[in-house]
Image (cartoon, helix red, strand yellow):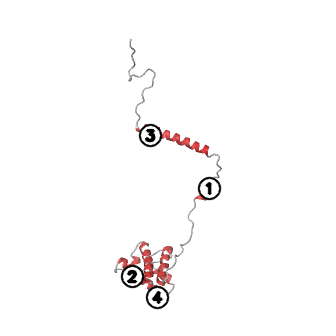
């Protein structure tokens, strides 16, 4: 009599049922569990492998520090010509002391473009006048002949970026002209 074999799709008695297909969330949960196990094993292995290395506790106050007050930035090398050097000092004054509008000097000591030139001229009205003329010329070259004066240009801006940049460009212009 020929032997009969059980059909492939019939389960043998006592064998577990074939696994049902897992959902995406179940697969993620299994992967998360497996990765957590691997990380825990790696942590233990690291601690075992580095236990013989002597270490001192680290105080974060020694590592994390606040900014150091270095004071105002040093003035770069001055231009060799007097008007250019004056405009460069005025530019530095605006950067370090602050910029203002509508007044020569505000309550905090910030200055407008002309106020910075005036304080850096140190009473030399001819030098101050020449620097203001070069500054007005630099402004008009960039913004057109409609600009009436340095104070009106200064007061027309809400931030210091453009006025301070124009004082720097005027210093370059004065140096190029040998003033």
Tag in front: 1 or 2: 2
- The label number, if any, that marks residue 28 in the structure image: 3
Q: Which residue is mark 2?
A: 137
The residue nearer to you, when weighing 151 against 176, is: 176
Q: Which residue is mark 4?
A: 126
- The label number, if any, that marks residue 132 in the structure image: none
Give how far apart the Cα atoms at labels 4 and 2 are. Answer: 17 Å
Circles 4 and 1: CB atoms closer than 8 Å: no
Percent from the top left, x then y, of residue 31? Answer: 46, 39
Identify the residue at horizontal 51%, vertical 74% (top origin).
Answer: 96
Percent from the top left, x then y, of residue 143? Answer: 36, 77
Circles 4 and 3: CB atoms closer than 8 Å: no
Percent from the top left, x then y, of residue 64? Answer: 57, 59
Comes first in the chain, label 4 or label 1: 1
| Element under disc 2 | helix
Residue 178 placement: quadrant: bottom left
Give how far apart the Cα atoms at labels 4 and 1 are. Answer: 60 Å
Give how far apart the Cα atoms at labels 3 and 2 are. Answer: 70 Å
Give how far apart the Cα atoms at labels 1 and 3 are. Answer: 39 Å
Circles 3 and 2: CB atoms closer than 8 Å: no
Q: Is residue 122 left or right of residue 155?
A: right
Q: Residues within 10 Å of mark 3 (few under 14, many from 20)?
A: few
Comes first in the chain, label 4 or label 2: 4
Q: Which residue is mark 1?
A: 59
The residue nearer to you, when weighing 136 against 43, is: 43
Q: Residues within 10 Å of mark 4 (few under 14, many from 20)?
A: few
């Amino acid at each position: 009599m020929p032997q009969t074999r059980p059909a492939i799709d019939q389960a043998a008695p006592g064998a577990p049922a074939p696994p049902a297909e897992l959902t995406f969330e179940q697969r993620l949960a299994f992967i998360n569990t497996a990765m957590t196990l691997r990380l825990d094993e790696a942590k233990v292995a690291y601690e075992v492998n580095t236990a013989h290395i002597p270490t001192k506790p680290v105080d974060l106050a020694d590592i994390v520090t606040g900014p150091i007050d270095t004071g105002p930035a040093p003035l770069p090398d001055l231009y060799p010509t007097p008007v250019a050097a004056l405009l460069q000092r005025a530019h530095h004054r605006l950067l370090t002391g602050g910029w203002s509008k509508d007044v020569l000097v505000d309550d905090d000591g910030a200055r407008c473009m002309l106020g910075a030139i005036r304080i850096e001229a140190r009473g030399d009205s001819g030098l101050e006048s020449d620097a203001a003329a070069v500054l007005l010329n630099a402004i008009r070259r960039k913004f057109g002949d409609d600009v009436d004066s340095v104070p009106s240009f200064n007061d027309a801006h809400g931030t210091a970026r453009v006025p301070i940049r124009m004082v720097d460009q005027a210093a370059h212009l004065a140096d190029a002209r040998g003033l």
